[in-house]
Each structure stands twice: as C-alpha cells, then as structure tokens.
C-alpha cells in the first residue's frame, strides 16, 4: 500500500487535568507500543473515588490523565509480547509490585516503590493507552465471553476490597458491618459474600434507595446510621461485629465503626480523609478493648488473582453496581452524579 493510501492516524482523545480541578479533552499524538508493551483501545474506564479525590485536591500536574479501572481491546502488541494478540478483550490493573523488595517479601506489596508507578499511559480516561511491560506480564488478562465489561471492570477495585477483607481476619461465619452503601460499600458486601463462606454482612447507609439495593444484593441487614447499633446487636447476640469496614471516611465515621465492633474486633479503613484530618477517639478503646485498626489502600497481584477466580466461577459479579455510562466529553456530568450521590459506579466511555 502506498503511504498516501494509508488512513491517517491523527492520534487519540484523552481527558486531561487542566489547572486546579477542571478537565478538558486534549488530542494526543499517535502511540505505538515498545518492546513488551501493548496498545489498548478503551471500551470503558470506571470512575473511582480516588480520581475524584485527586481532582478535588487539584493535586495533579496539568496534562495528567486519570482513570485506572480499564477494559479495552488489544490494538497492537510490541515485540516480545506473549499471550496477547490484536482483538483480545482485556482488563488490566495499573499498579504492579516488584515481588522482590523488603515490602513485597513482607506482604506489603502495595507499599513497594515500584508499585507506585502507573503502568497505564496516559491514563484510562482516554481513547487509547499504552500498557507497560510489567503490567502486560502480570496484571493484564484476556476476558472470556462469559464475563461482561461491566463485571471485569471491577477487577482492580474488588482486589483493593479483598485486601482489606483479608487484613480484617474475618473468619467463615463471622459478622461484619460496612459503613457506607455507595459503590465501594456495596462492592465490599459482594466481595465479602463471595470470599468468606457464610459471612454475615450488615450495611449502614443514610440513603433509602441504597439500603434497599444492599438488601437486594444479599445484605443480612441494611440500616440508617441511627438504628445501626440495634441491628448489629440483633445480628450478633448483643456482642458487636467481628470486623467493621469504613468506606465513608473521616474521624466521625471511624468513631461510628468503633461503636459497631465488639471488643477485640478489627476496623478496616478504606477511605480517603480530608488533608490533615486527625482521628479523635480515646486511645484506651484500642488498648483495653484490644481493637485492631488496619487499612487497605490498594490491591496487589495475589488479590487480583483471587478476585479473577471469583469472577470466573460466577461467585462475584458486581455489574449491578454500574448505574451510569458517560462519554469522555460529558465527564463533568459524571462528577455531578457522584457528588449528588445519584450514581454508584459510573463507567466512562471514550
Ligand atoms: Zn481506584
Ligand atoms: Zn517490591
């Protein structure tokens, strides 16, 4: 084919951070995968609370493209790529631990220096991304026809959730409570039910429609905050929960979690707090009541592997949490829906 006959590749569109908290569509030059890399054209990218947090904090340099919960099609593979071909539908996570440093060897893969690097360039709110070699090797999966985009897109967030659940030490048949019935709270419900046999799970949420959805998704109770401790007492014979998951964030939520857990229970912190916000509880609540406070900030490769198995087996299907699909050019509408608490998971479509 003569060069003049080739379709002209004039690059792709991406939603970039501008100054402060605003965003705009930019056209980026064409990209081609280097050795070990893969060029993926996006089908959907989930909007995560972390994206919103970063935007609201205006913490990103201009030109940054956010978005990291991606499902797309392999468009081109670099040399030395094995196991993927153009046309494959794939899901990929954006962080990969090295597996060899002191953090990784101690089980703190999410604290690994290499884990901080974003494996997706420029980012998921884009028509196309280059997936870096490390992610192609250990964090990218071909999606079978049996799994929809709406299910597979939860691989990364569900892995973060599963890490917190594992860190909680919740045993089969144990009683747990989730503070917050938004997208991440309800994802906790689904992952708890899928991963911990016979787990009892209550959801505490002020909005009635979210409480109803929690029940429909299998919660053992869902209550407004005012009556939550009664429901927990009922569920646990007056004892309190073994594990409480805070998906709401802030010192008030942390205190509420402490009231819902039994002595010797674990609180899992799974939410951003405002910059500089301090916890405000009596330290003896930890010491004399032997409570544990742990956090889950992200998920590593082994959590992703486990979530993928749960999805493939049909035990975990969070697709019902997708409540809106929004085009790149309507991104501000997605932010409005989240801020007004009118949507759970929003998928951004390029
Ligand atoms: Zn995220
Ligand atoms: Zn490491």
Image (cartoon, rainbow, N blue to C red):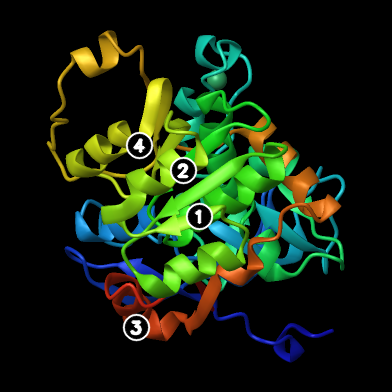
Image-quadrant location for residue 142: bottom right
Q: CA distance from mark 3 to mark 1?
A: 32 Å
Contact flag, marks 2 and 1 (Cβ < 8 Å)? yes
Mark 3, secondary structure of its residue? helix
Coordinates of residue 87 in the picture (x, y in percent): 83, 69
Coordinates of residue 67 in the picture (x, y in percent): 46, 60
Q: CA distance from mark 1 to mark 4?
A: 13 Å
Q: CA distance from mark 3 to mark 2?
A: 41 Å
Residue 296 seen from this side: no
User: In this orientation, which residue lies closer to the viewer: 275 or 203?
Assistant: 203
Image-quadrant location for residue 320: bottom right
Query: Dot 3, crowdedness within 10 Å: few (<14), some or many (≥20)?
Result: few
Mark identifier at residue 221? 1
Question: As drawn, is 286 to the left or to the right of 159?
Answer: left
Coordinates of residue 195 in the picture (x, y in percent): 69, 40
Q: Identify the residue position indicated by label 4 in the image.
A: 260
Mark 2, secondary structure of its residue? helix
The quarter of the rendered structure image containing the N terminus is bottom right
Q: Identify the residue position indicated by label 3 in the image.
A: 333
Which circle, 4 or 3, is nearer the viewer? 4
Query: Dot 4, crowdedness within 10 Å: few (<14), some or many (≥20)?
Result: many
Residue 114 vertical position relative to residue 119 in the rendered view, above or below = above
Which circle, 3 or 1, is nearer the viewer? 1
Mark identifier at residue 258? none
Within the displayed image, which quadrant is ligand 2 positioned in? top right
Query: Dot 1, crowdedness within 10 Å: few (<14), some or many (≥20)?
Result: many
Q: Say which residue appears at 12% left-offset and 36% top-offset.
A: 276
Q: Identify the residue position indicated by label 2 in the image.
A: 234
Residue 232 vertical position relative to residue 103 in the rendered view, above or below = below
Contact flag, marks 3 and 2 (Cβ < 8 Å)? no
């Amino acid at each position: 084919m003569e060069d003049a006959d080739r379709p002209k590749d004039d690059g792709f569109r991406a939603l970039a951070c501008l100054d402060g908290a605003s965003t705009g569509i930019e056209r980026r030059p064409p990209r081609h995968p280097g050795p070990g890399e893969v060029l993926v054209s996006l089908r959907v990218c989930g909007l995560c609370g972390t994206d919103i947090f970063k935007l609201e904090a205006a913490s990103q340099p201009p030109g940054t493209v956010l978005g990291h919960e991606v499902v797309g099609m392999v468009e081109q593979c670099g040399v030395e790529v094995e196991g993927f071909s153009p046309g494959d539908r794939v899901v990929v996570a954006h962080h990969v631990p090295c597996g060899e440093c002191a953090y990784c060897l101690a089980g703190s893969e999410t604290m690994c220096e290499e884990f901080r690097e974003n494996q997706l360039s420029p980012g998921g709110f884009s028509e196309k991304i280059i997936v870096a070699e490390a992610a192609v090797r250990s964090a990218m999966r071909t999606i079978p026809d049996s799994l929809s985009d709406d299910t597979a897109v939860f691989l990364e967030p569900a892995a973060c959730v599963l890490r917190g659940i594992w860190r909680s030490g919740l045993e089969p048949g144990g009683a747990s409570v989730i503070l917050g019935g938004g997208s991440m709270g309800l994802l906790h419900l689904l992952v708890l039910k899928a991963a911990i046999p016979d787990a009892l799970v209550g959801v505490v949420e002020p909005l009635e429609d979210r409480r109803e959805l929690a029940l429909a998704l299998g919660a053992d109770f869902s209550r407004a905050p005012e009556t939550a401790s009664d429901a927990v007492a009922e569920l646990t014979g007056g004892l309190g929960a073994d594990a409480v998951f805070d998906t709401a964030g802030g010192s008030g939520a942390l205190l509420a979690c402490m009231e819902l857990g039994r002595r010797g229970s674990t609180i899992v912190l799974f939410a951003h707090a405002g910059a500089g916000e301090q916890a405000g509880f009596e330290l003896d609540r930890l010491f004399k009541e032997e409570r544990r406070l742990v956090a889950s900030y992200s998920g590593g490769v082994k959590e992703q592997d486990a979530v993928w198995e749960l999805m493939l087996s049909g035990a975990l299907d969070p697709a019902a949490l997708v409540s809106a699909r929004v085009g790149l050019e309507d991104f501000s509408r997605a932010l409005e829906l989240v801020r007004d608490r009118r949507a759970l998971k929003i998928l951004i479509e390029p």
